[in-house]
Image: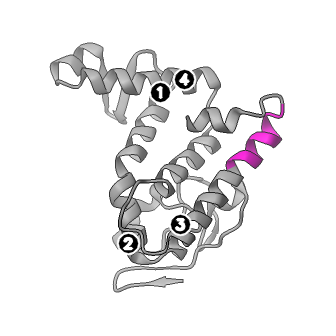
């Protein structure tokens, strides 16, 4: 359990994909909601996988500070999957190539569209997306990690969950988990 002036969380942790949709209150209907018992951190709920709250507050903050951009890009990619050559930055903010060029974001647009095309061709599922976000958070390149063993355990749980999910859902493609991460 982690306790600070603004936050207390005791999320459950298990090395399965199902554990990633647990909150302190139990199983949620939305796998994006991983840990939510504090109004002050409600805006971070979609970023917090089960097991993350067991890390020290300093390590949580280090991972969030170094991994937020990757997570946001993954969210744009997932929202953009149903569209063709457009990026959905928010529900009401969609950009095509011309708009990206005008905004000076053409390189970013093209890089993100490559990910969209890759994940679209692979048929990325919501559960895979959720685990990829968690992996991006746990694998960030923070240099200020205090307990690297705890972070490594979280990484192992998340990678194991993705591999287990892929083995059960897509046994015909034993390398799919690796392809999703690359």
Q: Residues within 10 Å of mark 1 (few under 14, many from 20)?
A: some
Q: Name the residue under label 3.
A: 151
Q: Mark 2 points at which residue?
A: 39
> Chief secondary structure of the magenta span?
helix
Location of residue 156 in the rendering, given as x and y in whole percent from the top left corner = 65, 59
Location of residue 22 in the rendering, given as x and y in whole percent from the top left corner = 63, 64
Element at badge 1? helix
Residue occupying image coordinates x 35% and y 20%: 110
Residue occupying image coordinates x 77% and y 48%: 164
Quadrant position of the C terminus in the picture? top right
Q: How crowded is mark 3: few (under 14 residues within 10 Å), some or many (20 or more)?
A: many
Answer yes or no: is residue 28 visible: no
For the residues carrying marks 2 and 3, which lies nearer the camera in this image? 3
Marker disc for residue 115: 1
Marker disc for residue 5: none
Marker disc for residue 118: 4
Horizontally, residue 174 falls left or right of residue 124, namely right
Quadrant position of the N terminus in the picture? bottom right
Query: Is the image coloured rainbow, by chain, by secondary structure, or in one colour?
Result: one colour
Residue occupying image coordinates x 67% and y 39%: 177
Location of residue 147 in the rendering, given as x and y in whole percent from the top left corner = 49, 74
Quote the CA–CA distance across marks 1 and 3: 26 Å
Q: Which of marks 4 and 2 is nearer the N terminus?
A: 2
Q: How crowded is mark 2: few (under 14 residues within 10 Å), some or many (20 or more)?
A: few
Quote the CA–CA distance across marks 1 and 4: 5 Å
Quote the CA–CA distance across marks 2 and 3: 25 Å
Location of residue 59 in the rendering, given as x and y in whole percent from the top left corner = 42, 71
Specify the segment rendered in magenta. 162-171
Q: Which of marks 1 and 2 is nearer the N terminus?
A: 2
For the residues carrying marks 1 and 3, which lies nearer the camera in this image? 3
Looking at the image, residue 108 lies above or below residue 48: above
Quote the CA–CA distance across marks 4 and 2: 36 Å
């Amino acid at each position: 359990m982690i306790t600070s002036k603004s936050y207390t969380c005791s999320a459950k942790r298990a090395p399965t994909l199902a554990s990633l949709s647990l909150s302190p209150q139990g199983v949620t209907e939305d796998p994006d909601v991983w840990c939510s018992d504090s109004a002050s951190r409600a805006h971070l709920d979609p970023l917090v996988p089960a097991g993350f709250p067991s890390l020290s507050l300093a390590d949580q903050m280090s991972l969030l500070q170094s991994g937020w951009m990757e997570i946001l890009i993954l969210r744009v990619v997932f929202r953009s999957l149903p569209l063709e050559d457009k990026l959905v930055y928010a529900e009401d903010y969609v950009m095509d190539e011309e708009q990206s060029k005008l905004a000076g974001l053409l390189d970013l647009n093209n890089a993100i569209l490559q990910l969209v095309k890759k994940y679209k061709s692979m048929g990325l599922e919501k559960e895979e997306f959720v685990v990829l976000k968690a992996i991006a958070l746990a694998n960030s390149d923070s240099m200020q990690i205090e307990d690297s063993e705890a972070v490594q355990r979280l990484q192992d749980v998340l990678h194991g969950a993705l591999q287990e999910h892929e083995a059960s859902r897509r046994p015909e493609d034993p390398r799919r988990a690796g392809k999703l991460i690359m």
